Amino acid sequence: MDRVGAGRPRIPTHLFSSTMTVRSDGHLLIGGVAARTIAEEVGTPVFVYDEDHIRARLREAVAAFSGTIAYASKAFLCRAMAEIVAEEGVHLDAASMGEIYVALQGGVSPAKIVFHGNNKSTRELEYATSIGVGRIVVDSFDELERLNALTQEPIDIWLRLTPGIEAHTHEFIRTGQDDSKFGFNVGNGDADRAVQWVANHRNLRLRGLHSHIGSQIFRLESFSEEVEVVAEFVQRYQLEELNLGGGLGVSYLEEETAPSVVDWVKAVDQAATRLGLAGETKLFLEPGRAIVATAGLTLYAVGTRKEIPGIRRYVSIDGGMSDNPRPVLYGSGYAVYAAERLFDLHDEEWSVAGKHCESGDIIVKDGLLPRDLRLGELLVTPVTGAYGYAMSSNYNKVPRPPVVFIGGGVMRVVVRGETLDDLVRLDA
Ligand code: LLP
């Protein structure tokens, strides 16, 4: 069995960042910093990011791709993350005024921001145009009209297409199919009508197209199919730019193997070349999860343990669906390990339960952990860097955990943990 600690230990390195190591006593280290040290300095739960891993993923994507990489900030954003994006010189995809604001706070140039959303408010559109975001991705006829009305200067836009592709992923995170709240439908002619609409309105300048078929996709052919549908469109209207969105999946479980970022950008490049886009059309990709998911992990402390004989063993942790709603929302699976004794046998089934008032608040169902789990010892769930902190909440008035970055062997708190005072900070 490919289990941690099962006799001869084999650590599933593909679920951890590149600077993860295991000390001779079985203790997890990130960039040389021990899990226990992190917990002692900032408490648990805590999101731990390996900054070097984030930079490495961005750099390899940039190096392997013929076009431009825009980091999809919805996966994880704070000022320090925006600073990395700015320093690495990549573009940034924002889906709200809030994401734009944080990106600017981190020094991202407005010209490198791509602004998305199926319901950008007029206020958001005014804000985006006033600061000069690089491209606005227009999603509907309604938005075309509103954007056209609020400007005298021509604005560079892309049109978001719904290419009619069923990506093989959870239905909540699929976006390319015909029945979607996003974009202009290719199949029913709306996309053509939108191109005509822009041609008849001087305030909007159509620079290209955008499409995004979904998220957590492992099948590279889905992306090639996407290129096929939209390439035809780009060529028909001789557009200069094409953004193919994000969506590359990552492995969350030991038995999963996802394509690498490099495999993905190369597959997109190859499809574009095959269809005659190379050299003619400037390509963009917007990875989110594939950049930050594996760079991040969560440390929790063990609390109540309970066994229902013949039914199940529960170990409760000091976080749960408020810091990781993905298991509840999508039924997502996570791996879990005893972070201070990775070489111990992990051979007993434990369901890792959150502390929230819902039976469904289970982070890992029937995970394998050591038999003698001790109060206060650390558990680690790897691959929580994407859509974890980003989707966290204060449910049950549980304060949000801190976020630490470890880079070059040095740890720093980049988002402090919320305090009890923070829980009433906004109360009027
Ligand atoms: N571009 C657009 C227009 C998007 O809507 C998204 C994700 C991305 C790029 C980045 O996709 P990624 O490379 O991260 O797959 N909360 C869900 C994922 C929702 C994704 C939304 N859009 C989850 O936790 O699985």
Image (cartoon, grey):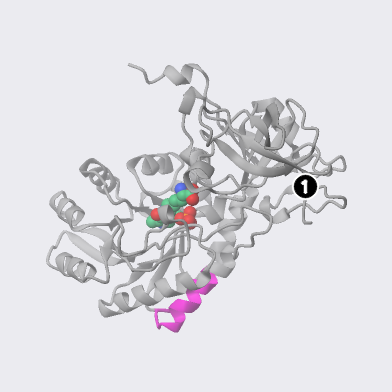
Vertical order, 381 against 245 (above or below): above
Viewer-nearest residue: 338 or 100? 338
The percent coordinates of residue 17 (x first, y second) are 67, 50
Identify the residue at horizontal 83%, vertical 50% (top origin).
Answer: 6
- Crowd around label 1: few <14 · some 14–19 · many ≥20 (10 Å): some
Q: Amino acid at mark 1?
A: Thr
Vertical order, 266 against 104 (above or below): below
The stretch of residues the image draws in magenta is 265-279
Position of 335 with respect to 110 (left or right) is: right
Q: Main secondary structure of the magenta part?
A: helix
Viewer-nearest residue: 364 or 80? 364
Identify the residue at horizontal 48%, vertical 23% (top origin).
Answer: 397
Vertical order, 313 against 244 (above or below): above
The percent coordinates of residue 15 (x first, y second) are 67, 52
> In the displayed image of the protein, which residue is found farthest to the front?
310
The percent coordinates of residue 9 (x first, y second) are 84, 51
Q: Is residue 276 visible?
A: yes
The quadrant in which residue 375 appears is top right
Q: Which residue is mark 1?
A: 21
Identify the residue at horizontal 52%, vertical 35% (top origin).
Answer: 321
Position of 174 with respect to 349 (left or right) is: left
Position of 345 with respect to 73 (left or right) is: right
